[in-house]
Image (cartoon, rainbow, N blue to C red):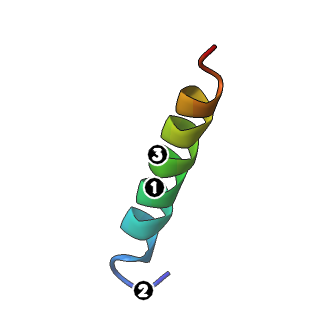
Amino acid sequence: LPAGVFDQLVNLKELYLLRNELTSLP
């Protein structure tokens, strides 16, 4: 993988998890 791509994937995963946490709030 080119440099920086892995960091972008990690950032996307973090945003995805954060969004799931926010949408799972009552």
Q: For marks 3 and 1, give the one nearer the viewer.
A: 3
Mark 3 Cα-neighbour bin, 10 Å: few <14, some 14–19, many ≥20: few
Mark toward the start of the polypeptide (2 vs 1): 2
Q: Label 3's element?
A: helix
Q: Secondary structure at mark 1?
A: helix
Task: Mark 3 and mark 1 in contact? Answer it, CB < 8 Å.
Answer: yes
Residues 16 and 1: in front is 16
Check contact, mark 3 vs mark 2: CB within 8 A: no
The kind of residue tagged 3 is Glu
Q: Residue at x 37, y 64 (%)?
A: 7
Location of residue 11 in the rendering, given as x and y in whole percent from the top left corner:
41, 57
Crowd around label 1: few <14 · some 14–19 · many ≥20 (10 Å): few
| Amino acid type shown at disc 2 | Pro
Frontmost residue, 18 versus 1: 18
Q: Residue at x 50, y 59 (%)?
A: 12
Picture layout, residue 20 above or below residue 10:
above
Mark 2 element type: loop
Name the residue carrying label 1: 10
Quickly name the residue at label 3: 14
Along the line of sight, the residue nearer the viewer: 1 or 10: 10
- For disc 2, the marked residue is 2
Amino acid tagged 1 = Val
- In three-dimensional space, the C-alpha distance between marks 2 and 1, rounded to whole angstroms, equals 14 Å
Residue 16: x and y, percent?
57, 48
* Quadrant assignment, res 26: top right
Q: Earlier in the sequence, mark 3 or mark 2?
A: 2
